[in-house]
Amino acid sequence: MPRDKDTEDWHGHRIVTEDDLAEGFTDHDPEHVDNPRYYRRRLLHGIVLGVLAAVLIAALVLAYLVKTRQVVIPALEPPAASTAAAPTHDPIAAACPQEMLPYAQPKDVTVNVLNGTKTPGLAGATAQVLKQRGFRIGDVGNAKLNNSKIVAAVVSGTSGRSKALTVQRQLPGTEYVKDAKRSADTVDLIIGDKYNIKKILPKGKAKTRDGRLSCPLAVKAARVKAQKEAASSEAAASEAAKP
């Protein structure tokens, strides 16, 4: 009697069926059920894939926020044009020196006393008072002031600024005027219409600490000019922005 033919056998070779494949990949494989390494490996793979997915999602969200300007990263921002074009000119410093200067001793200061008014004798009388306070007197005479409605102008070159400070300390209310062409450290005191010889401080009463020169009229003029220039620039910018 012939044997029943095995449907899963063909010419001595076993045919792999769908059930065999399902059984090969099932979690009920005896080799896996009792093997904790298998589950740890699967857990690790899951964690790695989860982290990678989270990083990718975070990168996409950040890129969207940056593109829509909801998040601003300073390092990626272009330099501001206004910063590059910011003016470095200080009109006040240009009008009046701003550095702190040491007080020079009167005996080291040579003063030319000049009369810028129509009242005779002021230069000579002032020279005598300053000489009594220890100043060395240079020229004594007359001079012309562009603006005579001041107490007095104190003029010096760059090298004579400390000595000009000492002269200003003797007579409150004077206006410092810089003379860029002057190389000597001598100082000119040019008397104006508001001058009063009685306003010269008594000997030893002037402040001797370091300080700055005083140029009230020049500073005021510089501020007014700067304000006008700023207003003009703003008006021009507004006009240019109009369609």
Image (cartoon, rainbow, N blue to C red):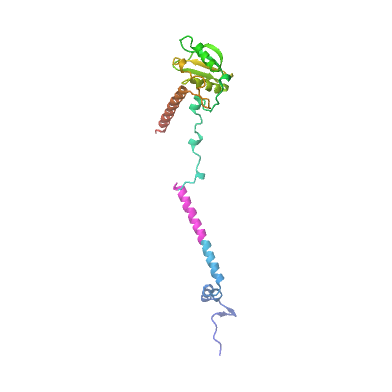
The picture places residue 185, in percent across and down from the top left corner, at 58, 19
| Residue 227 visible, this angle | yes
Q: In the figure, 130 relative to 5: above or below?
A: above
Front in this rendered view, residue 241 or 33: 33
Residue that extends furthest to the bottom in the rendered view of this protein: 1
Residue numbers of the magenta segment: 50-70
53 relative to 161, above or below:
below
Residue shown at 46% from the left, 53% from the top: 61
Q: Residue furthest top?
A: 120
Of 82 and 216, which appears nearest the observer?
216
The quarter in which the C terminus is drawn is top left
In the rendered image, is residue 177 in sight?
no
Can you give x and y, in whole percent of width and height, for residue 191 in the image? 48, 15
The front one of 12 and 188 is 188
Placement of 118 over or under 79, stated as above or below = above
- Majority secondary structure of magenta residues: helix
Query: Percent x, y for residue 73?
Result: 49, 46
Residue farthest right in this picture: 12
Q: Position of residue 15 (x, y in %)?
A: 56, 77
Q: How many marks?
A: 0
Question: In which quadrant of the rendered view does residue 11 lie?
Answer: bottom right
Q: Nearer the viewer, residue 17 or 114?
A: 114
Q: Is 100 situated left or right of 223 in this image?
A: right
Q: Residue at image x 54%, y 64%?
A: 45
- Is residue 37 found inside the magenta-colored segment of the image? no
- Image quarter hosting the N terminus: bottom right
